[in-house]
Image (spheres, rainbow, N blue to C red):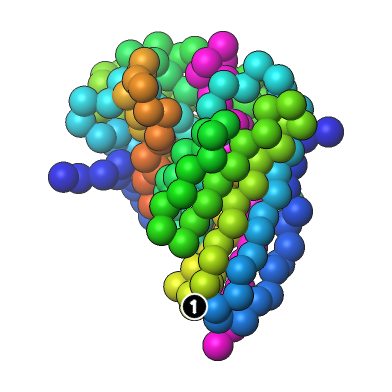
């Protein structure tokens, strides 16, 4: 079983739709969590951190449920430019490593 | 400011040849990571360094792979001999350790094709 698991999709949604991605992690010692975005044939870039209290950045909302070891990303009013792969990431201070999920592909259609 | 720099951006080589990938981390960053990304396996951590010292190389697939960081501004990942299954995109990333933000900054990657 992978340490961080995501539904690979693809998620095909129309512009303006709300879409949610989920992610589960198996290592309860994971301390911090992130969502990275990767455009086609580009490098991953940090989208946002994920906190237990939830955090919002414009149209993007991330949530963490430590009890269920579950992370989510909600995108509201999706734009064509949101089309990308979204990588769920767990960080363990014990190892100093980021563990990446396989990624969820989003395609926003006009 | 310059980000993480990798070279070459593309490499096509024949099976059995030696391949050397290069990385220059962001100035001031003291952690450096080498990743490999394929469709089948996603993004995998191969090895990482803190202050030029290899900390964890458990992701290095086999003895054909080796990595060095002779100084704070340069690292290499070498594959010798290369095999077709090594074809992938290899990313280098750097960060500041320890830091309150765990963000890693990725280079543009080297797309390796072994024929």
The part of the image, by quadrant, that contains residue A91 is: top right
Residue at (55, 62) in percent of width and height: A75
Q: List x then y, in percent, for residue B21.
A: 42, 40
Q: Chain of mark 1?
A: A
Q: Residue at x 25, y 35 (%)?
A: B26
Q: Return the residue nearer the eye: A62 or B106.
A: A62
**Residue at the disc numbered 1:** A80
Instruction: Check the image and report above or below for A8 versus B93.
Output: below
SS state under label 1: helix
Looking at the image, residue B78 sits to the left or right of residue B115; the answer is left
Nearest the viewer among B21 and A48 is A48
Compared across the picture, whether A77 is left or right of B84 comes to left
User: Which residues lie in the magenta part?
Assistant: A89-110
**Please, is residue B68 above or below residue A13 in the view?**
above
Magenta stretch: includes residue A41:
no
Specify the quadrant of the image occupied by residue A95: top right
Dividing the picture into quadrants, the one containing residue B59 is top right
| Residue at 40% from the left image edge and 43% from the top image edge | B106
In the rendered image, the residue lying farthest to the left is B1
Query: Could you tell me residue B73's position as x and y percent?
Result: 24, 27
Is the magenta region chiefly helix, strand or loop?
strand
Whether residue A98 appears in magenta in the rendering, the answer is: yes
Q: Quadrant of the N terminus of chain A?
A: top right
């Amino acid at each position: 079983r992978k340490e961080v698991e995501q539904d690979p999709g693809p998620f095909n949604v129309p512009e303006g739709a709300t879409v949610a991605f989920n992610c589960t992690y198996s290592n309860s010692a994971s301390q911090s969590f992130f969502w990275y975005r990767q455009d086609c044939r580009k490098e991953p870039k940090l989208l946002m951190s994920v906190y237990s209290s939830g955090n919002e950045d414009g149209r993007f909302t991330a949530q963490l449920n430590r009890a269920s070891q579950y992370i989510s990303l909600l995108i509201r009013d999706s734009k064509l430019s949101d089309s990308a792969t979204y990588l769920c990431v767990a960080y363990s201070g014990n190892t100093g490593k980021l563990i990446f999920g396989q990624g969820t592909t989003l395609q926003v259609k006009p | 400011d310059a980000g993480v720099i990798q070279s070459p951006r593309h490499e096509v080589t024949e099976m059995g040849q030696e391949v050397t990938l290069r990385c220059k981390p962001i100035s001031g960053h003291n952690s450096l990571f080498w990743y490999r990304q394929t469709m089948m396996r996603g993004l995998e951590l191969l090895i990482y360094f803190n202050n030029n010292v290899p900390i964890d190389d458990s992701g290095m697939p086999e003895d054909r792979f080796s990595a060095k960081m002779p100084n704070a501004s340069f690292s290499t990942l070498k594959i010798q001999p290369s095999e077709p299954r090594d074809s992938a995109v290899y990313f280098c990333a750097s960060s500041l350790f320890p830091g309150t933000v765990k963000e890693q900054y990725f280079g543009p990657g080297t797309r390796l094709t072994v024929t």
